[in-house]
Image: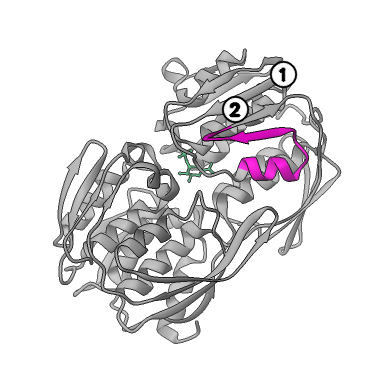
Amino acid sequence: MNSITILNLSSLKGEITVPGDKSISHRSIMLGAIANGVTTVCGFLRGEDNLATMAAFHSMGVQIDDDGQTLVIHGRGLHGLLEPSDVVDCGNSGTSIRLLTGLLAGQSFFSVLTGDQYLRKRPMKRVVEPLSRMGARILGRAKGSLAPLAISGGTLNAIGYESPVSSAQIKSAIMLAGLYADGDTSVREPSLSRDHSERMFGLFGASLETFHNGVTVKGGVELQGQEIRVPGDISSAAFFMVAALITPHSELLIRNVGVNPTRTGIIDVLRSMGGSIELLNEREESAEPVADILVRSSRLKGVRIAGNTVPRAIDEFPVICVAAACAEGTTSIRDARELRVKETDRIAAMAVNLRGMGVEVDECDDGMDITGVECLTGGVVESYGDHRIAMSLSVAGLVSADAVTVNDIDCVATSFPTFYSLLEQFRTGAA
Ligand code: S3P
């Protein structure tokens, strides 16, 4: 297990781009594979999570060519996937396993999905239960609530599902199953989670209707291959946004970032904390809003984050915790129980690590209170195998009094393989 030591940085100045959006990259392969004809994907994220999705479709007979720039996916149509001859390993990727469970439920073959030690602890009942209501036959450990999951695909019936949590993975799993169901399948969630599936389904010619906090998909409609441009991932940009805000004398332009309103909770939160963030050159590509983001160092203050903002910033809480630790006053995070079932328990992980850096943190079941300090102390911190914890703590190291050593950083490759080389550019002045 590798670790890294991060030293104080005097400023972040320049321009960067971040790798492609992870959620959109997963969906481009999945829909491309079951569409008719060829799908091309530019800007695809070659992180381990997305490569797991790509390998899964290879194992189901889908030809995917990659020249290092563009992916060319040779779609096999709605009913053209082949039975994989071995267990499909989703690695660390919750999106791969949950969306594939929905997709595989409607195939006419048997498949088994598993993942790494972290993924095998994450809750799967949330997709197994609604899919079972559609008639899917899925078995798993702990009464179907943990991977490995064994799926005996077959015919599905349409359902109307009220999801108890706002989760794009649950919604998308049901939408993918809905493509194979007899009739109209609807999902409604407490507040709208990221809507990349809805946008991409529309682009590929699926018959769907969106409504307040929900979507209806018509079964049996064939999809057509598309040309997809994947924007930079706002969840990856978030580390550099916070880095530029908390590091003095910084001015950073992050080009070509996806700014879908279901993902821009991070911008709203940081602006409400007093952060200077401007969106420039706003445009739309492949049905997704895109912009360049200009960030300048700012004095931050504590805020309360709760309600509908939470799903719109769900992956950014570890780095929001770092912003809060550097802000004046207390930041309260509530309604964020979902953070406890991410790649690790992100509430507990950030609380332990920030306390070790001299920050006062009070945990509660669905969130935490963080009181900012003048200067973080530094020290040795743990990622717990979670990429976003590792990157957030590395950002904290840029403004700590002493060096910060982050243990177990290999996980960063799941979503942002170039993170440390990009960070290094600010020391060498190459950005
Ligand atoms: C994702 C949905 C979110 C998010 C994850 C990616 C997706 O998970 O945390 O990183 O691509 O659908 P939940 O659906 O569990 O909130």
Mark 1 in CB contact with mark 2 (< 8 angstroms): no
* Image quarter in which the N terminus is found: bottom left
User: Horizontal and vertical percent for residue 291?
Assistant: 57, 67
Count of numbered tags: 2
Does 363 sit above or below residue 179?
below
Left or right: where 319 falls relative to 99: left
Q: Residues within 10 Å of mark 2 (few under 14, many from 20)?
A: many
Classify 79 as above or below 24: above
Estimate the x, y position of residue 98 in percent, counting from the top left. Answer: 54, 33
Query: Label 1 belongs to which residue?
Result: 183
Measuring 45% from the left and 57% from the top, which residue is drawn there? 412
| Dot 2: element | helix
> Helix, strand, or loop for circle 1?
loop
Q: Of the two numbered discs 1 and 2 on the same chain, state the one appearing first in sequence.
A: 2
Q: Residue furthest right?
A: 37
Looking at the image, is mark 1 or mark 2 nearer the viewer?
A: 1
Q: Residues within 10 Å of mark 1 (few under 14, many from 20)?
A: some
* Residue 209 is covered by the magenta coloring: yes
Please state the horizontal and vertical placement of residue 17, each as a whole percent of the image: 55, 71
Residue type at numbered disc 2? Ile
Residue closer to the observer: 242 or 96: 242
Asked whether mark 2 and ligand 1 are closer than 8 Å, the reply comes as no
User: Which of the two residues, 313 or 18, is positioned nearer the viewer here?
Assistant: 313
Residue 431 sits above or below residue 44 on the image: below
Q: Which residue is mark 2?
A: 174
- Residue at x 72%, y 23% (from the top left corner): 180
Image quarter for residue 104?
Answer: top right
Give the residue type at disc 1.
Answer: Gly
In this rendering, position of residue 262 left or right of residue 77: left
Rendered location of residue 281, percent (x, y): 60, 72
**Please, which residue is most extreme toward the bottom here?**
429
Task: Please provide the residue range marked out in magenta.
Answer: 197-214
